[in-house]
Image: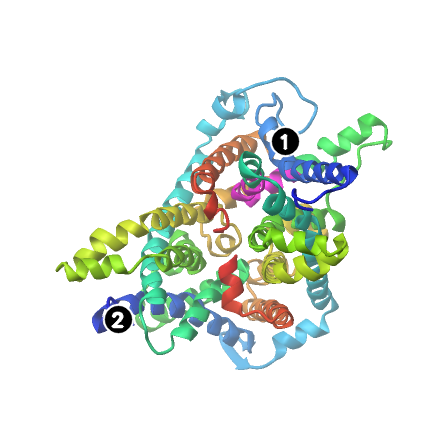
Amino acid sequence: MIPSLPDNRWLLRGRSLYLAAFFLFLLLPLSVVAVFAFNNSLFPTPPWKGFTLDWFVANAGGRTGLLFDSELLASIWNSCKVAFWVSLISVLLGTSNAFLLERAEFRGKGLFTTLMLVPLVIPGVILGISILAFASQIANFLYDSWEIELEWLRPGLPLVVMGQVSYIITIATLTIAARLKRFDTSLEEAALNLGASRWAILRTITLPYLKPAIIGSGAVAFLLSFENFNTTLMLVGSDNPLTILMYGRMREGASPVLNAVSLALMLVSALAVVLLYLRKPQQAGDN
Amino acid sequence: MNVLAPRRLGLFLLLAPAVLWLALLILLPHVEVGLLSLRERVGPGEFATSFKQYLTFFDEPLYWHTFVRTALMSVIVTVLALLLAFPVAWSIAKVARGRVRAMLMAGILLPFWASELVRMLGWLILLRGSGVIPQLLFWLGFTAEPVELLYHDATILVGLVYSSLLFMLVPLINALETLDDSLIEAAYDLGGNRLDILRRIVVPHAAPGIAAGCIMVFMLTLGNYLTPVILGGKNSMWFTEQIYTQFITRFNWEQGSAFAFLLLGLSSLLVWLGLKLTGQRFADSMRRT
């Protein structure tokens, strides 16, 4: 049980053993991905044929490493573009929603609060197809009525951005609102007494206080967008983001270059885990 | 009342983007899907209102079998994830301290911040016929030849449990952390055994966390697409795959919309039931996660 109570030695050992097995289960898939990124073979399977960096840097002999795989690099760039817009929009709306939730009083606030959480319980696939259907309906209507063709309402990266922000905004809102809730309003009242304008207070006191949450939720939004698959799959056009390209290649039969790009992704997410969670252990629960 | 509550213009400026977001990206798209699901193609470009799409679902065993199967497997995944995660959450919340605790947290967060694609690639390399585990079993002499471990129901379950552990662990850890150790000590001093303590103190205290974790895992599993498709191949029979097929492959949006509404209905129903049974409010438990 807990350390302050006496415990049977075998139970303690059993628990350590279980923890070890659990973490082996969690980390084994990632470890093999990393290891086989360096296997000198055309397929990411055993046997081990020696160490190579070909899957990162080769550009000859039937092997195209990560740095020369133009299709892969283009998809990473697409994902970056999408993730940039998603995090920008999510942070802006997340901040304004946080003020709505924590500061404003208006009719229908209860309904708004519930409705705002709804995107989290809708499966990503359904978010994707509903936005696809709605956007196509509008696009068709505009074309049929006035022959206006709006390219961004057809499957493609702009639609992917819309699909992803539809639920990532909620996550940003919850993170920023949680910090705003802990804010000591007497600081603002003091500034108001000392003659500061509301705008000056917002700019010099409230927003700087929210900055960690804003940066944090921006980073989370970027990662969530970069890694999103379900919603993206339904809305994607001819430009593939990274996850869609990886999915296509995995179905064709993986080549170790996928391991190489996966290893790069893992390093980025490990960095994010360290920066986002381990510096401030009390926020480890923010999901 | 807050002295700095937004005034009328400020309120409007704050409310406008939020309303646009919820209306244009959430409400209206789902209304559109609802309308699509209630119509039937009667001729080129001509549609009539009907329940045909829903009737097809009940008439065609493949469809509702897939639906029931997806629901049942999601329940199994939720139970397995809870059982596997609880001891780990307990160890992290109540036993581990300092650096060990930080390392354990990093250990559970890392796989989930790596993309789902990366995790699936790992399982593919481990499980396929030419992969690590079949080769190892063969080499050790357990099997006469390398066996294909992909495309079984058990494989899909393992993959789905793996994908959902974090969403069980985080709410459980949060709930267990707030349980005061002295309550457990008191129960122990008063002669309670492990089972009593677990049943009468720990579980009631952690109930909100358990509910939140189960709801999250169930929803995410029900809506998962990648894991069943990659690990189950053609045998996956997952309902999201049916939705994808109808929408993207067959271009039968009416049928796909009906399927989407059925899945959404099931998902909402079970979330509602879960909250009802544990006496939780939706907003409270979503915020907890």
Residue A123 location in percent, x, y? 55, 61
What's under tag 2, amino acid-wise? Phe
Q: Secondary structure at mark 2?
A: helix
Q: Nearer the viewer, residue A63 or A283?
A: A283
What's under tag 1, amino acid-wise? Val
Q: Nearer the viewer, residue B126 or B249?
A: B126
Q: In this rendering, does residue B76 appear at all?
A: no
- Furthest residue toward bottom: B49
Q: Which residue is mark 2?
A: B12
A257 vs B129, left or right, is left
Dot 1: few (<14), some (14–19), or many (≥20) neighbours within 10 Å?
many
Chain of the residue under label 1: A
- The magenta-colored residue range is B107-123
- Our reading of the magenta stretch's main secondary structure is helix
Q: Is residue A71 above or below residue A96?
A: above
Q: Which residue is mark 1?
A: A32
